[in-house]
Amino acid sequence: QVQVAESGGGSVQPGGSLRLSCAASGSSISSYAMGWYRQAPGMQREWLATMTNLGRTTYAGAVKDRFTISRDGDKNTVYLQMDSLKPEDTALYYCFTVQKIGENKKWGQGTQVTVSS
């Protein structure tokens, strides 16, 4: 059973940076894709970025110039470097993994990011 765990959330002032980490455990294979979503209070979950096991990255337009996804494929670990944070980036950030093409996403519990002065 694959388990996903995020870490690295916290509180930061506008303009600051945070780096989120996510580890997927319980699988002997490298995940096909890993990535990030976020959900602000009262809002739908919003996709942010994905990285495949071949290194292909895609980003949502709202974050592509400020957030960077990277991955340690051998360890099924993905990171989200978030720079120039804004108050509207405040949300619960979720990591997902897709073990094989066509399989459903598996989710972590989320890590809170709060951006305020």
Image (tube, helix red, strand yellow):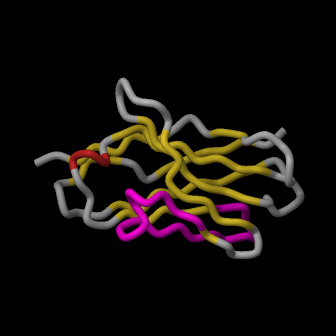
Asked if residue 96 lies left or right of residue 14, the reply is: right
Percent x, y of residue 42: 36, 24
Q: Is residue 81 above or below residue 96?
A: below
Q: Quadrant of residue 3?
A: top right
Q: Is residue 18 above or below residue 27?
A: below
Asked if residue 79 lies left or right of residue 4, the reply is: left
Q: Residue at x 39, y 40 (%)?
A: 112
| Farthest-out residue, left | 117
| Farthest-out residue, bottom | 55
**Residue 67: in magenta span:** yes
| Farthest-out residue, front | 61
Q: Is residue 88 above or below residue 50?
A: above
Q: Residue at x 30, y 64 (%)?
A: 17
In the rendered structure, which segment of residues is drawn in magenta?
Answer: 58-77
Q: Residue at x 53, y 67 (%)?
A: 69
Q: How many numbered marks, from 0 up?
A: 0
Asked if residue 24 lies left or right of residue 17, the reply is: right
Q: Quadrant of residue 39?
A: top left
Q: Residue at x 61, y 55 (%)?
A: 35
Percent x, y of residue 108: 61, 39
Percent x, y of residue 84: 25, 65
Percent x, y of residue 104: 79, 40
Q: Nearer the viewer, residue 22 or 85?
A: 85
Q: Nearer the viewer, residue 103 or 24?
A: 103
**Residue 94: in magenta span:** no
Asked if residue 12 lies left or right of residue 18, the reply is: left
| Farthest-out residue, top | 42
Q: Nearer the viewer, residue 104 or 6?
A: 104
Q: Is the N terminus in the top left, top right, bottom left or bottom right quadrant?
A: top right
